[in-house]
Amino acid sequence: MSSSDISARRPLAVVAAANFVAAAVIFGLFVVAALFSAERKDVTAGFDEVAHVSYVAHIQRTGGVWPALPSMHLLDPRTFQFTERANYLNHPSPFYALLAALGPTLEGHPAALLAHRLIDVGIAALGLAALLALGLAARWPRHAFYAFVVPLACIPVLAPLAGAVNNDDLAFMGGAVVLLGLWQFVANGRSSWFALALTGVVIAAWAKLTGLLLAGGFLGAVLAYLLWRKRLPYIWLGAAALVFIIAAAPYLVFIWQYGSPTPETPAQLALLANGAREAGWADLPRQSFPAYVSYFLVAFVADWMPTLVPRNPLQYAMLAIPAGALACAGAGIALSLRRLWRRNEAALDVVVLCGAAAIAATFAIHVVYSYGRHLATGWLMDAYPRYYLPLAAIVPLAALSLVAGIANPRWRSVLLGFLIAGPILFRLFGAPLG
């Protein structure tokens, strides 16, 4: 190798090293924040943690890995003894069976909660590590790399959620693995990456239904693209079909048992009816579908930084940051679509478009399903952005697609500055976590 080759490669090596250091710092800060939350969080404060812990404790007590949902009860959050109150969760059991096997006995042992939370920290940390690995594999320049990883690190609920027992952590990890696998497979075509993506689909799907919709929808869209471009060996198409069946198996069992992939158990129905009545929604006129969609969109943006206390004017103003980030992502999706139409798409464009398609389809199902619950009970608390954590990285990726389409260096720098600084400002001043 000549000296000119060495000098040409040296800047790339320097950038790669700097990006690796930044990724390591972000990963370390995330783990510290998650551990701090795991040690300090009240089990009754958000994320339905008592219900999730009770699910784990039920499996530990009975030894069954697929419990009858109506038979489960809630733990007392103080003594961790079972009460007569029914558990309202309607998720499949793999996540809870995993914790039941790995963690200490929960029933009657409140101190055992920390060990189970630490398992969740590890699960979420693996997810973040997969996304950081994607950013490093992409070999972006330093500021573009920051524009990808900083928004992920600043997701308001990510560290608190990682420090709690919750199946969203496993769904996030599975989705991150799918993103890494499919990014690498589209970029270099190595079959090992496709196998990793298939594994991620099963992980996300077995965590919760939205994991199946997002990860499975994303994989399905990438498969459609690869078939269109004649880049997918048929053996992998057969493997993907088998994985789809495996991933959907828990929900097929639910349909056979309860008639729905989201069983409406008596406790689930009572939670909605009683909650709507206590909030004063039950007796209010039901919203029209267009009005509900508008409400849902506003609540979705606001709940990116959830809070149980009223926002002040500054915190309301800060909501312009996630709204702006979504607008940038939308513009980036349009540019990726144009590149696809002109047949000059890169891996970034394929991942952005396929991920956006999966998110859009899931969001439409989410809104329609939630509207049905609103009509039945008046319920108005279904717009949870954390359900979309499996593909949350699509938003900064789409924003980078917009960056790639801006020729003017000054405007490109301005946009990168917003994408990097905006999430930090919103995390600091958007609202206190409730």
Image (tube, rainbow, N blue to C red):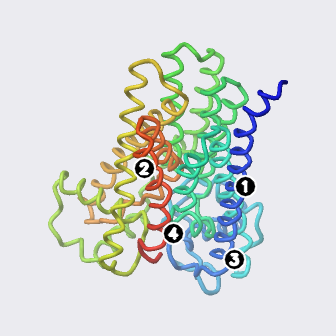
Left or right of 328: which side holds 423?
right
Q: Residue at x 34, y 48 (%)?
A: 327
**Gap in angstroms between the C-alphas marked 4 and 3:** 20 Å
Identify residue type, mark 1.
Answer: Val
User: Closer to the camera: disc 4 or disc 2?
Assistant: 2
Indicate the secondary structure of the residue bearing disc 2. Answer: helix
Q: Which residue is mark 4?
A: 47
Task: Work out how far the residue at label 4 is from the one at label 2, CA to CA, in angstroms.
Answer: 34 Å
Q: Would you name the residue on which mark 2 appears? A: 415
Q: Earlier in the sequence, mark 4 or mark 2?
A: 4
| Residue that label 3 marks | 107
- Residues at marks 2 and 1, CA–CA distance in whole angstroms: 23 Å
Q: Tell me which amino acid carries mark 3.
A: Glu
Left or right, residue 148 beside residue 296: right
Q: Nearer the viewer, mark 4 or mark 3?
A: 4
Q: Is residue 88 left or right of residue 100?
A: left
